[in-house]
Amino acid sequence: MITLQGHSLTLKEAEAVIWDNELVEASPESLERVHASRRAVEKIVAENRVVYGINTGFGKLSDVRIEQKDVERLQLNLIRSHACGVGDPLPEVVSRAMLLLRANALLKGYSGVRRDVIDILIALLNRRIHPMVPEQGSLGASGDLAPLSHLSLALIGEGHVFYQGKVVSSLHSLQAEGIKPLVLSAKEGLALINGTQAMTAIGVVAYLEAEQLARQSELIASMTIEGLRGIRDAFAEEVHIARGYPEQAAVAARMRQYMADSQLVTAQCEIRVQDAYSLRCIPQVHGASWQALNYVREKLEIEINAATDNPLIFDNGEKVISGGNFHGQPIALAMDFLAIAMAEFASISERRIERLVNPQLNDLPPFLSPQPGLQSGAMILQYSAASLVSENKTLAHPASVDSIPSSGNQEDHVSMGTIGARHAYQVIQNCRRVLAIELICAMQAVEYRKIEKMGRATRNLYTLGRKVSLPLTQDRVFANDIAAVEKFLKATPVERLAGQ
């Protein structure tokens, strides 16, 4: 059971909830803060004080005063009118993360919602009712208004959800689980949709996948080095200490461990003096991407515990401040950085693939083919990798450098952070496919070198990988192999791959 405090959620805990379906509860202390904040809202309504989002319109319409009798209708109208998402639905795992992060943010006690709102968010999470949220439509400032509106529809019994493996109406799932639809009260609609939980949820899922993939890339690259009889000296500890980047040194240390007992790697001048950069500079390139990953992790761990709606309530309602914590710029920049960093893992991997299949760059059979000429072997596997790498170059263009004014120019600078997060996630999927291709080619290469000479860690990866993709003894539809190895990598932690 994960206890939400509003300020202490970790990425490890988020991972347990998102993927392992760990149950969630709210701490008593956080619920006390929620009650205090709600009492402040009710006092504002009773006193008929003019406060943005409680008894005013929204955005450019913030100067329009709303009568007390229409305060609740205002919130329902807000959810319905802002549910303008388009495109395919976000993955269920992202929807699940959105529920978790929205509940945690509201438990900080700055938003003025009733406990009922927290309870239904947690109920959906624990009963695995996941709102169907279209992936497109957010500008990433005023928060993720459209995506969070679709999430909020599920709470009030409208819209659709993923439930028990099917897409059903929200009302059906709530009735099946004995959950009463939420009836929104003052400020609650705005509190639900004014935040960064869509981009941050995508970011959390993307980062957790990226971290695993980055670790896997080092093990796969180690097998490639064996297949190419690469030089171990470039990974020597003193080389990386001399530069001073801890991430670079850590990559080299892990790869030394993977190749420690290998009889296939070589010494300097044993076969050649130097390797190509895509082998020799792996610690430098991967290490730089790890620096970016560490930056992204830091920003996500702040944002998943952040109050990002507007206005925020302080001092028992004596201060209600309209600010801009909904602006997604910190996550927008982090997601752009994540896309660039992960694109580099794929880029250098594709160059290693080329070295594995190109007969002008190695002493292996051309394109690793069992019958060069009659059979094309891995020739077009490299084409696919090159295509994915090229696509990543487009996806890695920063989304955060763009801004289009909205809401009658009241909201005149936006982050496009959700677009950046979606692009980063797609880059990661492409990167995994490239690494799957590298693994297929590397396994074939080490077979020509004799697998009994492999290191223990890489041989364990080879043994597991061959259960998914068979040797290249005959040309076949390699799309099936790529898909199978991609699925295998996504499901298997690097520790298991390395036999640790």
Image (spheres, rainbow, N blue to C red):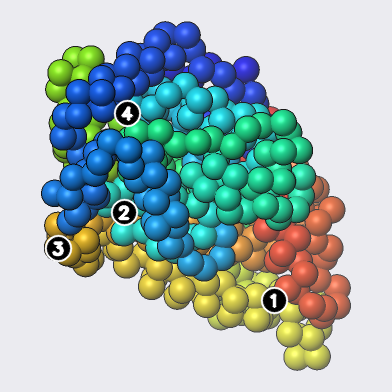
Is residue 199 depicted above or below 10 in this figure? below
Q: Quadrant of the C terminus?
A: top right
Nearer to us: label 2 or label 4: 4
CB-based contact (under 8 Å), mark 2 and mark 4: no
The image quadrant that residue 296 belongs to is: top left
Is residue 91 depicted above or below 36 in this figure? below
* Residue indicated by mark 2: 140
473 displayed left or right of 115: right
**Mark 1 surroundings within 10 Å by alpha-carbon count, few (fewer than 14), some (14 through 19), many (20 or more):** many
Depth check, front residue: 283 or 148: 148
First in sequence: mark 2 or mark 4? Answer: 4
> Where residue 63 sits in the image (x, y, percent)?
13, 49
The image quadrant that residue 157 belongs to is: top right
Numbered label attached to residue 308: none
* Residue indicated by mark 3: 409
> Where residue 75 sits in the image (x, y, percent)?
38, 43
Q: Residue at x 52, y 68 (%)?
A: 87
* Element class at badge 1: loop
**Mark 2 surroundings within 10 Å by alpha-carbon count, few (fewer than 14), some (14 through 19), many (20 or more):** many
500 displayed left or right of 408: right
* Residue indicated by mark 4: 111
Q: CA distance from mark 1 to mark 2?
A: 42 Å
Q: Amino acid at mark 2?
A: Gly
Q: CA distance from mark 3 to mark 1?
A: 54 Å
First in sequence: mark 2 or mark 3? Answer: 2
* Residue indicated by mark 1: 378
